[in-house]
């Protein structure tokens, strides 16, 4: 099942990052270039680094210049993440290219790769919520509240994994079909963001 593969690879990526817990360290992807595992590992490692960048930028004592540089780094990371999700969807589209949709087949509101993107973020939430449950010195009330949240997150994980596998199964049977929609983020494009193209004059 694809969801089980995603869980294994994402959890490995999260664990690898936290060996050094440094946003400037890039882990070596252990999988063969171009393989599904390679793409999934790359995807989650981007998410994991960005998770910690988002923590850092919320430091109330951060210097404005440093915060601006970090914000631009987060923007770049978001674009890289989006591009990779679209690449993964292209992989799925190629995998199912021989499947002819049956009469009445429908398109899902969310593509396989964007559902997998949600799973990547969800596993990061689970990892860090578990850290809060286990945090030394924290109040019992804090740990109890985090334990309740952790249980909800794990239920979401089970539900989302089931939905991902069901979607791919239905695509394989021709009951669903998929497309790759490019996000076309306008604010990153110097030809589409009016602030950016005005500076070129």
Image (cartoon, rainbow, N blue to C red):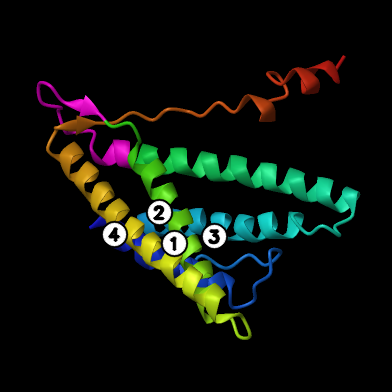
Residue 183 lies, in percent from the top left, at 51, 29
Residue found farthest to the front: 141
Q: Judge the density around disc 4: few (<14), some (14-19), many (≥20) Cα neighbours within 10 Å.
A: few
- Quadrant in the rendering for residue 23: bottom right
Q: CA distance from mark 3 to mark 4?
A: 22 Å
Assign the N terminus to one quadrant of the image: bottom left
* Circles 3, 2 touching at the beta carbon (< 8 Å): no
Marked residue nearer the N-terminal end (1 or 3): 3
Q: Is residue 79 visible?
A: yes
Callout 4 secondary element = helix
Determine whether the residue tagged by mark 3 lies in a helix, strand or loop. Answer: helix
Which residue is at 33% across, 42% downward?
A: 112
Q: Earlier in the sequence, mark 3 or mark 4?
A: 3
Relative depth, front residue between 98 and 146 = 146
What secondary structure do most residues of the magenta stretch adopt?
A: loop
Nearest to the observer: residue 30 or residue 193: 193
Q: Nearer the viewer, mark 1 or mark 3?
A: 1
Where does the image place residue 44, in percent across and percent down from the top left? 49, 57
Disc 1 is placed on an element classified as helix
Residues drawn in magenta: 92-107
Q: Which residue is mark 1?
A: 123
Q: Are marks 2 and 1 in contact (CB under 8 Å)?
A: yes
* Nearer to us in this view, 195 or 39: 195
Residue 104 is a magenta residue? yes
Taking 88 as reference, is 108 left or right?
A: left
Q: What mark, if any, has residue 45 been given in the picture?
A: 3
Q: Residues within 10 Å of mark 2 (few under 14, many from 20)?
A: many
- Rendered view: 72 above or below 149: above
Q: Report the residue marked by disc 2.
A: 119
- Residue 56, percent from left and from top: 73, 60
Q: Is residue 33 visible in this depiction of the protein? A: no
């Amino acid at each position: 099942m694809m969801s089980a593969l995603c869980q294994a690879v994402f959890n490995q990526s999260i664990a690898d990052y936290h060996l050094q817990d440094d946003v400037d360290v890039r882990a070596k992807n252990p999988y063969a270039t171009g393989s599904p595992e390679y793409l999934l590992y790359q995807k989650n490692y981007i998410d994991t680094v960005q998770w910690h960048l988002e923590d850092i930028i919320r430091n109330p004592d951060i210097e404005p210049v440093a915060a601006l540089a970090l914000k631009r780094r987060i923007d770049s990371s978001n674009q890289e993440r989006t591009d990779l999700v679209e690449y993964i969807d292209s992989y799925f589209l190629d995998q199912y290219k021989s499947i002819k949709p049956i009469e009445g087949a429908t398109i899902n509101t969310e593509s396989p790769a964007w559902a997998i993107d949600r799973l990547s973020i969800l596993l990061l939430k689970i990892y860090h919520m578990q850290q809060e449950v286990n945090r030394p010195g924290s109040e019992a009330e804090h740990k109890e509240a985090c334990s309740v949240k952790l249980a909800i997150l794990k239920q979401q994980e089970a539900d989302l994994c089931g939905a991902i596998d069901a979607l791919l199964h239905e695509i394989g049977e021709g009951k669903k079909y998929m497309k790759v929609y490019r996000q076309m983020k306008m604010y990153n494009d110097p030809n589409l963001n009016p602030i950016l193209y005005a500076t070129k004059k």
